[in-house]
Image (cartoon, rainbow, N blue to C red):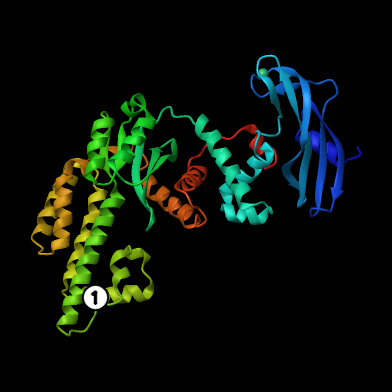
Amino acid sequence: MQLNVKTILNLKEKNPRFVYRDVRLTETKGQRIEVKVEPRRGSKGICSGCGKKCAGYDRLPQREFIHVPLWGIAVIFLYCMRRLACPTCGITAEVVPWSTGKSPLTISYAWYLSEWAKLLSMQEVAIQFKASWHHVCSAVAMAVAWGRERMDLTGITAIGVDEIHWSAKRGFMTLVYQIDNHCKRLLWCGENRTEKTITEFFDWFGEERSANLRFVCSDMWKPFLNLIALRAKNALNILDRFHIAQKLSDAIDDVRAAETKELMRKGKEVVLKYSRWCFLKNPENLTENQKVKLKDLLKCNLKTIRAYLLKEDFQAFWDYVSTVWAAKFLDQWCAQVMRSRLEPMKKVAKTIRAHRQLILNWFEARNAISLGVVEGQNNKAKVVIRKSYGFKTSDMLKISLYHKLGKLPVPELAHEYF
Ligand SMILES: [Zn+2]
């Protein structure tokens, strides 16, 4: 079979009502393949108002539609849109199958760019395919709008709520994940971390679906806990393990900072300097130098060391099989901390006591849902934010988060060129 570009076009992008006429390689606007598109002889246009076939009225000036590049060469469709005389709508523009109307990209090209933007950052896609940054953004926005409209919200029984720091100027973004064993994805995100934000989520999610929730995983922030109790009435609220670990690490940091200051004041050797990571990392992740340093540090009877050992003790809590014994351990641990005279640690123990039941709920939920998901997803969201330095609006960041973490559906068409 003889092969020309028209053959490839008809293979990939056949439109029964249109034909590909001339195909030329031009150099005037940079190297590009221009494809002239014409209505098939005798075919009528389809009215953009009512979707019915109508007689033509006139033709608009020629428009360019950017299509999927071929071997690195830009491919442009050239077409004069028909205006139609519709008996119902009056004079209207026709709809064409390769374009959504205003966008300069063909639908196939938009899906092509947006699928790549799941693997690379938008900047990288723009550079790789010599597309403009704006075109990549609009392609991703189109894909997200399409997917969000069609996403399946049935069977969601577990969610995790978390917040992420966006920028000093803009503050926080609240993220809600589905954390069911069968599906883990970003469900929703909203600006700030306020009662209003979480209310907006429940309004979007709907009363019936909220009533079907069995587990909600969150941090200890009071307004969240109150609203979850109110809006997800049948759900067990669980405090996330990694939020508790975070609180303990922060407390050690406070103890260490205060003690370093005290030692410096007394003119003693600053053993604690540069030791921060020794206490915050898990022991198995320490470097050789840090291991030696930690060993030396553990020989001194410092407050920081005592705080560190209390945190290490707490790890055992998560290994209990029985909730009853876990509860006993928790009470003993808290009692021990309260006698420790380490104020930041005592503060954590008080918080843990105040949320005792929510923490113990973890044992009931751990086999039913994927509790590590929130932390994992949170880390991925941070990567998206780090790569989003070009975003001027929170909407663009949201779109990017949904695109990368939302597991949104895509049409068959999206796989055509990918
Ligand atoms: Zn019409």
Q: Identify the residue shown where x is 43% and y is 54%.
A: 382
Residue 61: tell me if it is visible. yes
Residue 305: tell me if it is visible. no
The mark tally for this picture is 1
Disc 1 marks a residue whose amino acid type is Leu
Q: Position of residue 3 (x, y in %)?
A: 88, 40
Q: Identify the residue shown where x is 61% and y is 52%.
A: 133
User: Quarter of the image holding residue 52?
Assistant: top right
Q: Position of residue 160 (x, y in %)?
A: 35, 41
Q: Is residue 254 left or right of residue 73?
A: left
Quarter of the image with the N terminus is top right
Q: Position of residue 88 (x, y in %)?
A: 66, 15
Which element is circle 1 on?
helix
Q: Which is nearer the eye, 415 or 165?
A: 165
Relative to 277, residue 92 above or below = above
Q: Which is nearer the eye, 247 or 81?
A: 81
Q: Identify the residue shown where x is 26% and y is 38%.
A: 237
